[in-house]
Every structure is written in structure tokens, then in C-alpha cells.
Image (cartoon, coloured by chain):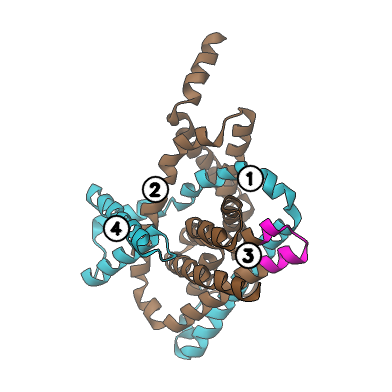
Amino acid sequence: MVAWLAILAACQLAGEIFAQVTHLPVPGPVWGMTLLFGYLVVNGRVPDGLGKVANALLSNLSLLFVPAGAGIILHFKLLAADWLPLSAALVISTLLTIGVTASAMTFLSRKSRPSISGEQGE
Amino acid sequence: MNNLRDVWVYLSENPLLHLTMTLAAYLFGHAVYRWRGFNPLFNPVLFAVTLIVIILLVTKTSYQTYFQGAQFVHFLLGPATVALAVPLYNQIERVRRSVVPILLSILAGSLTASISAIGIVWALGGSRESLLSIGPKSVTTPVAMGIAQELGGLPSLTAALVILTGIAGAMLGPALMNRLGIKDWAARGLAMGVASHGIGTARALQVNEAAGAFSGLAMGLNALATAILLPALWHAFR
């Protein structure tokens, strides 16, 4: 377990360094994810220990956003000054984005491979 | 009474108090969420954040003091993002089968997110700061703050809007997609990741591993697409 936690941290570290060096607009942890993904493709399967550590972290992913979320306390004034345009934009634009992305994916994947549409559904 | 005060003064400066508070608020929020039959309106992140903000305001605790304890939880976001490679790898066959639809859908979602947010704030007469800060609202926080800086917005306002966008998407997204009749887990996951970054991904992972994998993929690619497209569009049409 500890070895895999160390490997996750090392991937992130390598990602952070890569992000610093290249100045590409992608955060270090996302590069780290790309690196680990590359390893998994080469390895051909997910090692048991890595699967366990990943599962432990990801099954509680929502919790990890709570500290940053409480940071809203610092911005009440800015948010309050423009609350109507901001809240309308947040809700409407988020719903619009979800609707457009999900519909586009459904439409395009049906169009490109009509044969697998039977796989869709829950 | 003085003793009690001393205990409070000691604890309020100790990171353990705010670490415990963060965990307890989330557990409480999750218990309420389960008790309400996983009704999305009782989103555990929103519940925990609201509870913590109220406690900080009542006890006159600064966010900096709170964060000294909460940072131990916050820190795990990095390794957790790296770990998203595992569900993504488990979906590699599905991803490979539909690379073009995935990329086009993310591109459509990315443009919709930025343009509609800026357009709505502009139409409703929002300030210039708000206009420039809300563009990257659907992008994961560190990238969104960088984009806001480049456009001339307020990165700290963007950070707050990003979190609120994530919560809004996690609360309202699944119901909207049910109404639209979208059942494919890949499409549902992509939409959550494009619109609501990591918070949407966390929500998607709770429901279905495939949806979580596509959501994580969409989060990463949307950050890249928005960071390239939004500043370019802004400079072209300003």
C-alpha cells in the first residue's frame, strides 16, 4: 500500500516538474495521471496494491473538495456585489454545458458506430 | 470557566481541531445525504462547506487558521487526481473505440461553458471583474485561476466560482440528463467532467466507475482546451 502511495506521489511530483518546465496550461497532477496511465498501458493490467490505494482515495473524492470549498468565506463581498448575474450564469451555463456535452456524445457515438447502440442503457 | 477558555485557545490554534472538524462535517453531510435517500439537493460537499463556514463565522476563526488543519485533507487532491488513471485504464477499450466523438463533445462543452457564462453575466449587467472571472468556471481550480489571471479577472473570485459550479453541476446534472433521456455512462461522465471538473467527477464515480473514468478524462482535456481557446477567443473578439 505504502509503495503505491509513494508511486502516486512520485507521479504527481514528476507532473509538477513537467508543468513548471513546459509552462503548458495543464496542472501537475493531470500530467501525473497521464504518466501513471502510460505505465498501466505498458504494464497491461492494474496491480492489486495500486487498485486498492486508488479505490481508497477515489471513493472519498468529494471529501477532498471541502477545505477549498470553505474558501468561499473569503469572497462573500465579491460574490454578493454581483450575486444575480453570477448565480444565473453559474446555474444556466452549467446546465447548458452538461446538456450540450452529453447530447453531443450520445449523437456522435451513435452516428459513428450504430452497431454498439445496443450496449447503451443502464 | 477560565480553564475552558484556555482549552479553546489551545485547540483553536492546533491543526487537529480543524482537521477533525472537516472530517466530521463531511461525515455528517454524508449521513444526511444517505438519510434523504441520496437526494442531490442534500449534496454532502455543499452541506459540509456550509456547516464549516457557519462555524468559522460564529467562532470568528480565520480561513488561514482553519486551513492549517484542513490542508491535510486538501493535500490528497493531488494523489487522488493521479489515481484517476486507474478507472481510466479500466475503460481503455471504450475510450479507444470513440476517440473522435469524445474529443468533439469535450470541445463543444468547453466552448458552451465559457461563452454562455460570459454571455449571461454580460446580458444581466454584471461588472467587468465578474465577466472576466467567470469564463473558466468549469475548469479545475489551478488552471481556472491561471486563465482568469491571463484575461485580467480576479483569480480568487474565479476559485470561488469554480467550487460553486462544481457543486451546482453535481446537484443538478444527473436530474437534467435523466430528463434528456441520456443513459450512456460515457456521455453522462463526459458531461459531468466538462461542466463540473473534479466535484462532478467525484459525483460520477459514486454512481458508476465508467462514468467516473470518462469524467476524469473530460476534466483533464477540458482544462487544456479552455486554457488554449478562451484567451484566444477573448483577444480575437474583444
Inspect this view and state whether residue A41 appears.
yes
- Which label is found at residue A14? 4
**Mark 1 / mark 4, whichever is N-terminal:** 4
1 and 4 marks on the same chain: yes
Residue of label 2: B76
Query: In percent of the image, x 73 and y 52: which residue is there?
Result: A83
Residue of label 3: A94
Residue of label 1: A75
What is the quadrant of residue B166 in the picture? bottom right
Q: CA distance from mark 1 to mark 4?
A: 33 Å
Q: Secondary structure at mark 4?
A: helix
Label 4 is placed on what type of residue?
Ala
**Mark 4 / mark 3, whichever is N-terminal:** 4
Q: CA distance from mark 3 to mark 2?
A: 26 Å
Q: Which chain is brown?
A: B
Q: CA distance from mark 2 to mark 4?
A: 16 Å
The local crowd at label 2, few if under 14, some if 14 to 19, many if 20 or more residues have their Cα within 10 Å, is some
Query: In percent of the image, x 49 and y 51: which residue is there?
Result: A62
What residue span does the magenta drawing correspond to? B118-131
Label 1 is placed on what type of residue?
His
Q: Which chain is cyan?
A: A
Q: Chain of mark 1?
A: A
Q: Is residue B128 above or below residue A112?
A: above
